[in-house]
Amino acid sequence: MSAGRIDTVRDGRVAVVTITNESRANSLDDPMLDALVAALSADALEGARAVVLTGAGDRNFSGGVDLQARDGAALTDAVRTGERLLGRAADAVEDCPVPVIAALNGNAFGGALEIAMAADWRLATRGARLGMPPARLGWVYAAPGIRRFVRAIGAPATRELFLTGRPIDAEAARRIGLVNRVVDRLELRALALADARAIAANGPIAVAGMRAIIRAIEDDPDPARAEAVADEWRDRAFASDDIAEGLGAFREKRDPDFRGA
């Protein structure tokens, strides 16, 4: 039986997904990783336009893969299984059908930090510590996870984070681009929800299209690829009812009511 769970509540068109396992620093066991994938699926998020991903309590976002939950007699194999499931969870965050904001309500270590790096952006509470300790365990981290860090903070900062294994505080993480903003603990949820609501109020086609273009620019050095993705999404937007609604609302000085069609 899992020691923890993944909780989802709706706040209008925003889904708040919470890693809940406070007695183990919100660490993630195998059933929780599977549950996180399910919580971020298109079916589970039907009607939602943005996600806030956070941890329970005010001390830890997550301590990563729960090594204590592994079978000591075959720990290496169990860790490999956990790493594979964690990779699936990070992919589910990155491929989520709507934008994901990671609200780091406390410390984030190892695979949990990779999951946060797969989000569209990150907010962190002041005093949180973030780290990648695999080198201290003799563990070579998987390339897709390392790629997420290189893409966000560059190779030199990634080397320092992974090769030393030293955690950094939230302010240092902000300076290198690991998190976007550092806020007081009591403000974190409200600010993350404000960001998510701002996304949810915008045109879903426009949000999805620009998200796809940014991803293409990140992932492919050939500018023609991003231009092709942009052309596809721009054609879709210009043919949609949403653009007429957006322009009409602008002229009429009212809030738009986008339908995503």
Image (cartoon, helix red, strand yellow):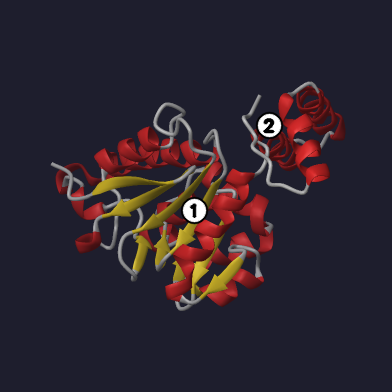
Picture layout, residue 164 above or below residue 212: below
Cα distance between the residues tagged 1 and 2: 24 Å
Quadrant of residue 58 within the rendered picture: bottom left
Sequence-first tag of 1 and 2: 1
On the rendered structure, is 209 left or right of 102?
right
Picture layout, residue 161 above or below residue 151: below
Q: Quadrant of the C terminus?
A: top right
Q: Residue at x 36, y 33 (%)?
A: 38
Picture layout, residue 178 above or below residue 250: below
Q: Depth check: give the residue in front, 30 or 20.
A: 20
Q: Residue at x 43, y 74 (%)?
A: 185
Q: Amino acid at mark 1?
A: Ala
Picture layout, residue 38 above or below residue 155: above
Q: Report helix, strand or loop for mark 2.
A: helix
Residue ID for mark 2 = 205
Q: Quadrant of the N terminus?
A: top left
Residue 182 x, y percent position in the rendering: 56, 72
Residue 179 x, y percent position in the rendering: 58, 64
Residue ID for mark 1 = 116
How many marks do you count on the picture?
2
